[in-house]
Amino acid sequence: MIQSNRLAIYAIGKIKKLWIRDGINQYKKRMPELIINELKAFNLNNLRSNNNIIICLSEEGKQFNSVELSSLLLNFKNKKINFLIGDTDGVSSDIKEKSDLVLSLSPLTFPHELARLILIEQIYRAISLSNNSPYHRS
């Protein structure tokens, strides 16, 4: 079972669009333990440890369907999983190289604010799949 208290999202910048913030808040109500940090810059030294997994979002990353993403997160067992989302310029190649996985949400390009909402929904879906919840219908 995937536990939301093992998951964290680190994103550059603040959400400015109210409708995106409202969507994120809806999922936060369902996963109150999920950590979401808005930063000015990434500091991998704070995130790097033996028990941490770093997943960087980038359009050229590896793509998973929802079931595969859920399985991937389950495979990380008791590790803390940290998702990194860049700003309008994305994430630097240095951060991508130091990440354990570079993940793409889609072959389409999304604004960074919308990518946060999509990621949070997919995290909720992965948790639901791992709990055999009816939220995900295939």
Image (cartoon, grey):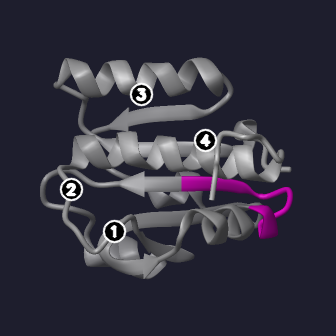
Q: Are marks 3 and 1 in contact (CB under 8 Å)?
A: no
SS assignment at label 2? loop
Find residue 96 and report its image quarter.
bottom left
Q: Are marks 4 and 2 in contact (CB under 8 Å)?
A: no
Q: Earlier in the sequence, mark 3 or mark 2?
A: 3
Q: Earlier in the sequence, mark 4 or mark 2?
A: 2
Q: Are marks 3 and 2 in contact (CB under 8 Å)?
A: no
Q: Are marks 2 and 1 in contact (CB under 8 Å)?
A: yes
Report how far apart the C-alphas of labels 1 and 4 lie in the structure: 17 Å
Is residue 133 placed above or below 100 in the rendered structure? above
Kind of residue at disc 3: Ile
Q: Residues within 10 Å of mark 1 (few under 14, many from 20)?
A: some
Report how far apart the C-alphas of labels 3 and 2 lie in the structure: 16 Å
Q: Earlier in the sequence, mark 3 or mark 1?
A: 3
Which stretch appears magenta? 74-82
Kind of residue at disc 1: Ser
Report the side of 132 relative to 80 (left or right).
right
**Which residue corresponds to mark 3?**
24
Q: Nearer the viewer, residue 16 or 64?
A: 64
* Place of residue 24 in the rendered image (x, y in percent of width and height, measured from the top left): 41, 27
* Quadrant including the C terminus: bottom right
**Which residue corresponds to mark 4?**
124
SS assignment at label 1? loop
